[in-house]
Image (cartoon, rainbow, N blue to C red):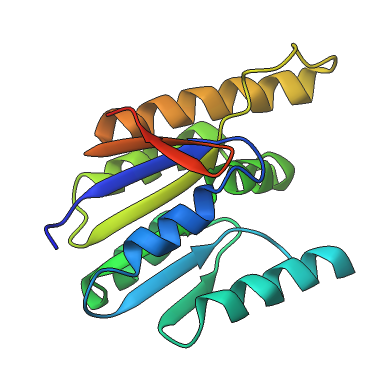
Amino acid sequence: MKKKIIFITGGARSGKSSFAIAEASKAKGKKAYIATAEALDDEMKERIRKHKKDRGDRWDTYEVPLRISEVIKKTEKDYKVIVIDCLTLWLSNLLHSGKDIEGEIESFCRSLSTIHCSLYIVSNEVGMGIVPENEMARRFRDLAGMLNQRVAERSDEVYMAVAGIPVKIK
């Protein structure tokens, strides 16, 4: 498998993560999964547990709510493929943390140009609905759209998952 960056976007429960895992699983060699979700309640704890079980023992998992660029830099030479799931949860975590969001996004996008393994990046497409009623939600939507554009621009392939069907758009 040649080194590539594959970006997968779509709505909630559209099949993005399943597609990323299925495609990344085809690679021979060590695989890593960078999870940005935090287990803040029982329902999320159960989701995380189920996702780990579904991936099985063939994946090393890194639970990284904020510092994905650092983890990629430290680990990417050890793996044939890494899945990041997902950028919109990461962005939400950044918003709530008070960190320099634009700086973190810039650091992440810069890290994509020096990656040594294949990378599958999952993100939600959040800008297809109505304009949110509050400032924070509008800021999140705008930042997510900008982040998705920047990642798609740097990606070798881009897919949009719709109703469980991945559609290649680049």
Position of residue 46 measured from the top left corner of the image (x, y, whole percent): 78, 72
- Vertical comparison of 18 with 132: above or below: below
Is 62 left, or right, of 79 in this rendering?
Answer: right
Any part of residue 50 in sight: yes
Q: Residue at x 61, y 59 (%)?
A: 65
- Vertical comparison of 167 with 115: above or below: above
Quadrant of the drawing holding the N terminus: bottom left
Position of residue 118 measured from the top left corner of the image (x, y, whole percent): 24, 58
Q: Residue at x 63, y 27 (%)?
A: 126
Is 74 left, or right, of 148 in this rendering?
Answer: left
**Residue situated in front as seen by the camera: 127 or 50:** 50
Any part of residue 85 in sight: no
Quadrant of the drawing holding the C terminus: top left
Q: Quadrant of residue 80?
A: bottom left
Q: Residue furthest left?
A: 2
Q: Residue furthest right?
A: 42
- Vertical comparison of 146 with 83: above or below: above
Q: Residue at x 77, y 25 (%)?
A: 136
Position of residue 9 measured from the top left corner of the image (x, y, whole percent): 48, 37
